[in-house]
Structure formats: structure tokens, C-alpha cells
Amino acid sequence: MKKIPQNPHTMQDNSINEFMDSDAWKKYEKKERGKRKFVKTGKNVVHLEYLRHLLSEKDISDFEAKLNDVDLELSSYDKTGTFYAYLDEFQLTVYLLITQPLIGELIKGISTNATWDAIKYILISTWKKIKNQSYVKRTSQTSENKEVSFGLQVQLDKNTSFNLKLEGDIEESIIETSLDKVLNFISNQNPNKNYKNTDFGYFDRTGNEWVKIDVDNEIRKRAKSKNKGNKKNKDN
């Protein structure tokens, strides 16, 4: 009987479904739902996901005051104990999230320079504190020390979002340059017609520009490569 090749999308979905059905995940998810009840929402909210061993209550209060000065609110969420799954190199451990309508106003220049300056202040201050720091990455079965990744997450709409990483091993002047180019980069992105995983972006110091990585394509390529490897092992 001829074997029907497995669809790499299905393989990826199956592994995710198995993880989501585990007792460890269900227990964790229940805990997270309770914590997220206290997260602020609204059109003037900027959200910070962080780890409490990296940022103090004083830091959070300082960020709140900066945003209040430009009529914005800070929502913060302590991610300590969070599970991390597949392709975590394209995710951000700690990030500042900007959504609509604020990101649209920033791109169009409707918001003031003071608004963007306040956001940059939080990004650069957090970058200074957590660059080259580590955390314990937990999955349903393992734990290991990993370097903290940090950056800006932008959500254009329900289908389109970006993780823009601020590297920890470069000069502050390059971080400032990369942030000065963020809004132009985002303004050149087309909204997705259908939902996609959050795309990843990094600042290319040679080209002096932001570069996008399509995370969905990365998942497909890795699933395909894994499938080929498994087939090769079976043939041997």
C-alpha cells in the first residue's frame, strides 16, 4: 500500500495539541487566567510583559509616570513561571506591546513626539537593565537557563503582529538608531488577510535597517526538514 505523506502543518498542529492537552499546561493556563484578570485594556494602554527578577516595582512606577505625562496608561504583567514552546528564538521574553489605535497614530504622526519619546524611554531603560541577563526557560518537561530576549511587540490588527528584538550585545547608539527606524518599518508592512503567527524582526547593523522573518515559513521549513530526517532514519 502506498504511504500518504504527512502534511508538515498537521505534524506541527499535532505536537501543539498534545502539549495543550497535558495536565501541566492546563494547570498553568488556569493560573494565567487568574493573573490576567488584572491586566488593563483600552485604547491608551501600553502593555509591558516582564520578569520580576529583572524589573523592580520602582521601575514599573517610573514607567507609569512617564506614560501618564503623555496621557497613556501602563499595563504590566509578570511572566515569571510562564511556559515557552516551539521556536522561542522568534519570541520575546520581555517586551513592550503597542496596539491599535496608538500604533496607527504614531505611524501617521497624529500622536506627539513626546508620546514616542516616552515609549522609547521605557524601551531603552528596560534594555539597559536586562541586556545579557538570563532566565529559566520552562517547558512541560524541561527547564534550562536562557538569555533574556527583549524588544517591542507591535500589533497592527488581529491578523498582523511583529516581535522586534533589541539585541543586548550592541551599543546604545545603535539601539537608538533602530528605534528611530521602527515606525517607518512598521508603516511599510502590509496587514495579513488571514491570521499568522507573530513575525520576527531584527536590526541589521550592516544594512542599517530592520529585517523581517516570516515565522510561519520558518515553522513549515523546520517541520519539512524534521520529516525528511525521520524518513531518512527509517530508510536506514
Image (cartoon, rainbow, N blue to C red):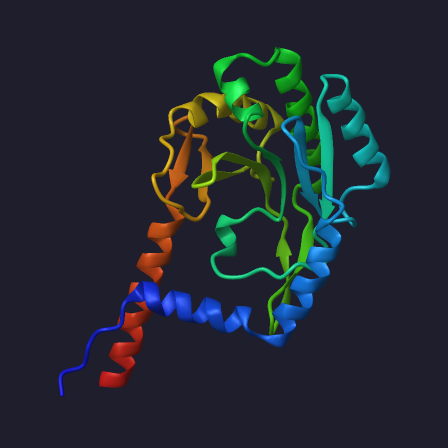
Q: Nearer the viewer, residue 49 or 17?
A: 17
Q: Is residue 35 left or right of residue 99?
A: right
Residue 40 in picture, x, y percent from top left? 72, 38
Q: Nearer the viewer, residue 36 or 200?
A: 36
Q: How many marks?
A: 0
Specify the farthest residue to the left: 2
Q: Residue at x 25, y 78 (%)?
A: 232
Residue 152 in picture, x, y percent from top left? 57, 35
Q: Quadrant of the C terminus?
A: bottom left
Q: Quadrant of the N terminus?
A: bottom left
Q: Is residue 14 left or right of residue 174?
A: left
Residue 153 in picture, x, y percent from top left? 55, 37
Location of residue 109 with respect to 178 vertically, above or below: above
Q: Residue at x 55, y 12 (%)?
A: 110
Which image quarter: residue 55?
top right
Q: Is residue 231 visible?
A: yes
Q: Residue at x 43, y 41 (%)?
A: 159
